[in-house]
Amino acid sequence: DQQVKQNSPSLSVQEGRISILNCDYTNSMFDYFLWYKKYPAEGPTFLISISSIKDKNEDGRFTVFLNKSAKHLSLHIVPSQPGDSAVYFCAAKNRDDKIIFGKGTRLHILP
Amino acid sequence: ETGVTQTPRHLVMGMTNKKSLKCEQHLGHNAMYWYKQSAKKPLELMFVYSLEERVENNSVPSRFSPECPNSSHLFLHLHTLQPEDSALYLCASSHFEQGYYGYTFGSGTRLTVV
């Protein structure tokens, strides 16, 4: 049973528009959430994170929103750029420091 | 280079072969991890080493045998694998105290078992 779910395998967004990647989780004991970005033939790289005690964290074009009551988080990228085309993994940390990853969402930025 | 180097990048092996995957980091991290990424599945944690001692084994079959001779090197020894073991194997490292925040991944080894 997946504890971290990314229900959209892929997403296409026009360059310059906002990209919104969604993630749902089932374990209310997760205390930290992370987004990783992965290009083909490379390992995932850390992008942005949020503590469970916050509802928003912003870093440049990237903002992560956390809705604990809905057990939902989202990553907003604005404006979207061609280099943002990649696979984005949502991940969550439990209190045993174990990281649980989602399956990933492939983002295509269209010219 | 990301700081974590994995070799080989690609590996094709028969079910009766024995091979090893290698991971090397020079980031001063004290924890190293093996993850498995199968098609259309989440990244799965396989093993965790902290200060060269295995601290976690996520019910991985014994045909996968990790080795961590020092804090900079991690191996995954493979023997009598099955076709369903074909996947991308990712190594990561971190400062154990900051595990979740400081993950650095390697580029992975794409393993195909025939």
Image: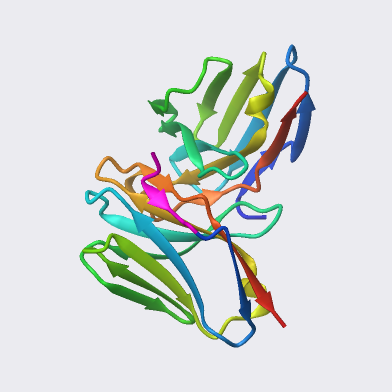
Q: Residue, x 49% and y 35% (percent of image)? A: B71
The image quadrant of residue A56 is: bottom left
Q: Residue, x 67% and y 31% (percent of image)? A: B86
Q: Quadrant of the C terminus of chain B?
A: top right
| Residue B95 visible from this viewpoint | no
Q: Position of residue A31 (x, y in %)?
A: 25, 54
Q: Position of residue A93 (x, y in %)?
A: 33, 49
Instruction: Please state the extent of the stretch shown in magenta in the rendering.
Output: A1-7
Residue A101 higher or lower than B52, as above or below: below
| Residue A16 visible from this viewpoint | yes
In the foreground, B73 or A42: A42
Q: Position of residue B49 (x, y in %)?
A: 44, 31
In the foreground, A8 or B78: A8
Name the chief secondary structure element in magenta: loop
> As drawn, is B70 to the left or to the right of B23?
left
In the foreground, A89 or B73: A89
